[in-house]
Amino acid sequence: MVNLGDLLLRYSFLIFMLHVIWSSNNKLVIADVSAIFIFGDSTVDVGTNNYLNGSLATANEPYYGIDYPHHTATGRFSNGFNPADYIARYLGNYKKSPSAFLALVQKTSTFKSSISRGVNFASGGSGILDDTGNRGFHNVVSLTRQIEQFQTVRGNITEILGDVKASKLIANAFYLISVGSNDFFDQFRYNYNISAAELIFDLTDTFANQLQNLYNLGARKFGIFGIPPIGCCPAIRAVTPGGACNETLNSYAQIFYNATFNLLQHFSSANPEMNFSLGNSFLMTKGVIDNAAASGFVEVKEACCGTGPFKGIDKCTQKSDLCKKRDEYLFWDRFHPTQKAAKMAALTLLYATGQEFVIPINFSTLATIQH
Ligand SMILES: *[C@@H]1O[C@H](CO)[C@@H](O)[C@H](O)[C@H]1NC(C)=O
Ligand SMILES: *[C@@H]1O[C@H](CO)[C@@H](O)[C@H](O)[C@H]1NC(C)=O
Ligand SMILES: *[C@@H]1O[C@H](CO)[C@@H](O)[C@H](O)[C@H]1NC(C)=O
Ligand SMILES: *[C@@H]1O[C@H](CO)[C@@H](O)[C@H](O)[C@H]1NC(C)=O
Ligand SMILES: *[C@@H]1O[C@H](CO)[C@@H](O)[C@H](O)[C@H]1NC(C)=O
Ligand SMILES: *[C@@H]1O[C@H](CO)[C@@H](O)[C@H](O)[C@H]1NC(C)=O
Ligand SMILES: *[C@@H]1O[C@H](CO)[C@@H](O)[C@H](O)[C@H]1NC(C)=O
């Protein structure tokens, strides 16, 4: 049964997508933010895990990066750029996301000149809980650790600019956070003895502390991606009877989105200088899955690169099946969007006018707030 509300929602999504596709051909640079700091998992990682010993959550070999400049596999879990790259590109004078923290610290001669434009701390496989990802991928940087690394960088910026200028830069910077899916995937994989309600409570509680730590370090403008319909990614379809979505996982994503919104509302009333935007990746992605053709995609179930059913069994390698028309696919590999889907998502979060996809304000408005 499709109700009127659903229909209207889909309709407004299509109109919005047309608007995005049209306007993305024009130049849409709006806010020249002082800096961008990025936290989270593989959805926004630009190569952190290349610097971790023994990490299995890597994307530094072809066919990753096949559509990236010079076909380089950088560690992005994409055929090209990822959502962090597009957010950075449209928020200011960036070509792509700032570099990974672990890459910057290796280049001591340029470290200081780089960090004041921003740093990317995100690590594929990681989650809100400290243990998430370590069992399956051996070595990832948890969100807690990422925030500790930011604390180091904040200290370095203060050394360079002095207290007053550094505080201003830190307060006006944009904080992009995309995390949470792996906490649920780990629960799915290892079936930890914890109820969904307890897990969501733990996640919300831990995330609140992590945001508070960032706020206490001077962060003010939080742009947050909600988690997508994780039950519909090729890795999950591949192990679900009939290739269906796992609606239990999808319901966790929706419950967690609501919990995150409540948390952010409480958090911003308790911390008066905080501003946030929360992106509804669930609704955006579901809109594409349910209206593939109208959204500009041909294949929204199977990944472009991988093996097995829905190409959902293994990560993308040079031995995988590779699709030809990458722009026709929603999923690049068993978990991650193609560059085209990443760009659409970023543009939606930046410029959406209604309240369906990003609340209470869009990312471009968030970026222009001055502290
Ligand atoms: C990673 O492994 C290399 C070689 O085994 C070693 O030299 C290096 O110290 C290790 N790095 C870390 C961070 O453990
Ligand atoms: C950044 O700060 C850390 C911790 O205070 C320090 O160990 C490191 O040397 C600093 N880096 C630079 C390049 O100043
Ligand atoms: C869907 O995911 C839930 C949560 O991890 C799991 O308990 C359930 O067995 C999965 N269902 C199917 C059909 O795989
Ligand atoms: C799982 O949790 C329940 C309730 O907390 C407990 O009674 C049970 O012994 C636990 N099972 C395992 C295998 O740890
Ligand atoms: C999330 O919140 C919205 C608006 O309050 C509500 O309509 C929806 O049913 C909630 N979804 C879940 C899964 O709790
Ligand atoms: C930013 O946050 C402050 C304090 O909560 C609030 O008064 C203001 O309206 C917010 N700005 C925008 C553009 O939402
Ligand atoms: C972003 O949001 C603001 C305020 O909600 C709105 O005025 C503006 O039109 C939106 N941006 C775009 C490009 O739609």
Image (spheres, rainbow, N blue to C red):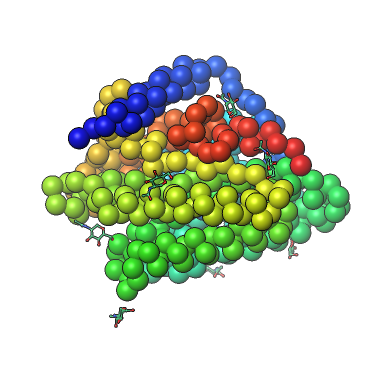
Q: Which quadrant holds the C terminus?
A: top right
Residue 364 in view:
yes
Which residue occupies 69% across, 33% down? 368
Instruction: Say above or below: 181 vs 10.
Output: below
Q: Residue at x 65, y 51 (%)?
A: 269
Q: Nearer the viewer, residue 115 or 144?
A: 144
**110 or 151, nearer to the observer:** 151
Quarter where residue 58 is shown: bottom left
Q: Which quadrant would residue 29 be assigned to in this image?
A: top right
| 156 on left or right of 25 | right
Residue closest to the far front: 4
Q: Is residue 287 above or below residue 149?
A: above
Q: Can you give x and y, in whole percent of width and height, for residue 138 in the image?
A: 42, 67
Residue 44 appears in the figure: no
Residue closest to the eye, 336 or 314: 336
Report whether 194 appears left or right of 265.
left
In the rendered image, residue 319, in percent from the top left (x then y), is placed at 26, 47
Residue at the spot 54% in from the left edge and 49% down from the top edge = 177
Q: Report the residue at 26% width, 50% height from top.
A: 247
Q: Is residue 28 above or below residue 232?
A: above
Q: Residue 39: x percent and y percent?
A: 56, 52
Where does the N terminus fall, quadrant-wise?
top left
User: Residue 258, image x and y in percent?
Assistant: 44, 50
In the image, farthest residue toward the left:
242
Which quarter of the figure has residue 180? Answer: bottom left
Side of 48 where 108 appears, left or right: right
Q: In which quadrant of this rendering is ligand 3 seen? A: bottom left
